[in-house]
Image (spheres, rainbow, N blue to C red):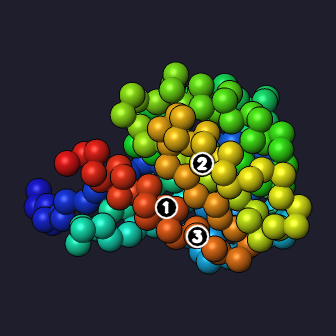
Amino acid sequence: TQRKPTTYEHIFKFIMVGDSAVGKSNLLLQFIDKRFQPNSDYTIGVEFGSRSIMIDQTQIKLQIWDTAGQEKFRSITRAYYRGALCAMIVYDITRRESFENLASWLSDCRKFSSSDVVIALVGNKCDLEANRQVSIQEAQDFSKEHGLIFFETSAKTGQNVDDAFEKATQQVWKRLQ
Ligand code: GDP
Ligand code: MG
């Protein structure tokens, strides 16, 4: 049988975790489709999206797994850390509790993904400055302490969304060289 020549493709698996309603699904939607859903439904289990970006003149396809934040899905989520090159832990800058829960998400990341996984901390909903409950400074301190890269984003306006995914991809790329 004849085979078409295939071009080699880099595929990076990403996983998005964090409390329910922090904006994980909308970050993915914004990154992949440049869209925002004001009243999005809860993610059931795990959803998936992909987009290719260029890093160092190399095409990289990101396969991004979007998980549900609720505790009842936690064991499902845990299975998806496997093989992930980047974990994005998302919190909501207007909901303090989602920041307080970071330690538990971080602990899952460390336990269930590989030791060289790039972990990005994403403080979402930065368009809601008036309702801010987590300062940039303390999020930066937390990131520094745990060796994470940090971004504030808005899935609503799109602010910093591409940048967060691109910088995280660059970091993964660097680790693989
Ligand atoms: P998930 O449970 O983490 O996937 O969160 P969703 O993406 O479903 O978002 C939860 C709610 O927050 C929805 O009503 C979204 O419209 C809203 N939301 C998500 N991201 C943002 C954001 O950046 N800014 C604002 N103002 N609302 C957002
Ligand atoms: Mg969701």
> Horizontal and vertical percent for residue 113?
46, 30
The answer to which of marks 1 and 3 sits earlier in the sequence is 3
The answer to which of marks 3 and 2 sits earlier in the sequence is 2
Residue type indicated by callout 2:
Gln
Query: Which residue position holds label 1?
Result: 165
The answer, for residue 66, to whether it is visible in the render is no
Q: Is residue 147 left or right of residue 93?
A: left
Label of residue 46 in the image: none
Residue type indicated by callout 1:
Phe
Q: Residue at x 79, y 29 (%)?
A: 72
Instruction: Report the Cα–Cα distance between label 1 and label 3.
Output: 9 Å
Q: Residue at x 60, y 42 (%)?
A: 141
Q: How many marks?
A: 3
Q: Quadrant of ligand 1?
A: bottom right
Q: Mark 3 or 2, which is nearer the eye?
A: 2
Q: Nearer the viewer, residue 94 or 56?
A: 94
Specify whether tag 1 is near ligand 1 (CB below 8 Å): no
Instruction: Report the Cα–Cα distance between label 3 and label 2.
Output: 16 Å
Tag 2 secondary structure: helix
Q: Nearer the viewer, residue 99 or 177?
A: 99
Query: Which residue position holds label 2?
Result: 140
Instruction: Report the Cα–Cα distance between label 1 and label 2.
Output: 18 Å
Tag 1 secondary structure: helix
- Label 3 crowd bin: few (<14), some (14–19), many (20+), radius 10 Å: some
> Horizontal and vertical percent for residue 153?
65, 64
Label of residue 160 in the image: 3
Q: Mark 1 or 2, which is nearer the eye?
A: 2
